[in-house]
Image (spheres, rainbow, N blue to C red):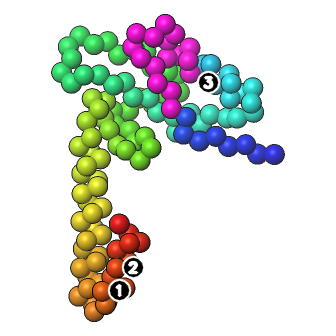
Amino acid sequence: MVKFADDLTLVTPAAAIVSVEAEFASVQSWARDNKLQINLAETKEIVITRCGRQGFMQPPLIPGVARENLVKLLGVTFNNHLHFADHVRKLQIVARQRLYLLQLLKRQGLDSTCLDVVFKAIV
């Protein structure tokens, strides 16, 4: 038997009684007990802070876990200040690419019924 678990998100507030390290150790223990393996190479940490906050001390690094300033969660990209500019930029690029494709297909003589099918498939 093979078991898979995907996309676990652990959220720990700064004022939590339990540390992030302890919470992560608990998740690792649970995974081990249930014969699941956590892929540390794909495990990421992001510390979210207010923009321009002075004197904030980053929590200690979790051994084996990369700390990132930009992450993608449930298809949404955001940074460590909860700004979504990177996500919006990517959506704009994808929209422009798809509109360009529809424009090319129209110039090639594809009729409106077929263009409508392509549009519904890619948008």
> What amino acid type should be assigned to the residue bearing mark 1?
Thr
* Residue 22 pos. (x, y %): 56, 14
Q: CA distance from mark 3 to mark 2?
A: 45 Å
Do residues under tags 1 and 2 come within 8 Å of each other at their CB atoms? yes
Label 1 belongs to which residue?
113
* Residue 2 pos. (x, y %): 76, 45
Asked where in the image residue 91 lies, by quadrant, the reply is bottom left
Residue drawn at 67 percent across, 35 percent down: 37
Mark 1 residue element: helix
Q: Residue 41, can we see it? A: no
Is residue 23 found inside the magenta-colored segment of the image? Answer: yes
Q: Is residue 105 above or below residue 56?
A: below
* Residue 42 pos. (x, y %): 52, 39
**Closest to the observer: 86 or 62?**
86
Q: Residue 111, can we see it? A: yes
Is residue 8 found inside the magenta-colored segment of the image? Answer: no
Which residues lie in the magenta part? 9-24
- Disc ID at residue 117: 2
Label 3 belongs to which residue?
27
Front of the two marks 3 and 1: 1
> What amino acid type should be assigned to the residue bearing mark 2?
Val
Residue drawn at 49 percent across, 17 percent down: 20
Mark 3 residue element: helix
Q: Is residue 36 left or right of residue 17?
A: right
Whichever of labels 3 and 2 marks the residue nearer the N terminus, that label is: 3
Q: Is residue 121 left or right of residue 69?
A: right
Asked where in the image residue 83 lies, by quadrant, the reply is top left
Q: Residues within 10 Å of mark 3 (few under 14, many from 20)?
A: some
> What amino acid type should be assigned to the residue bearing mark 3?
Val
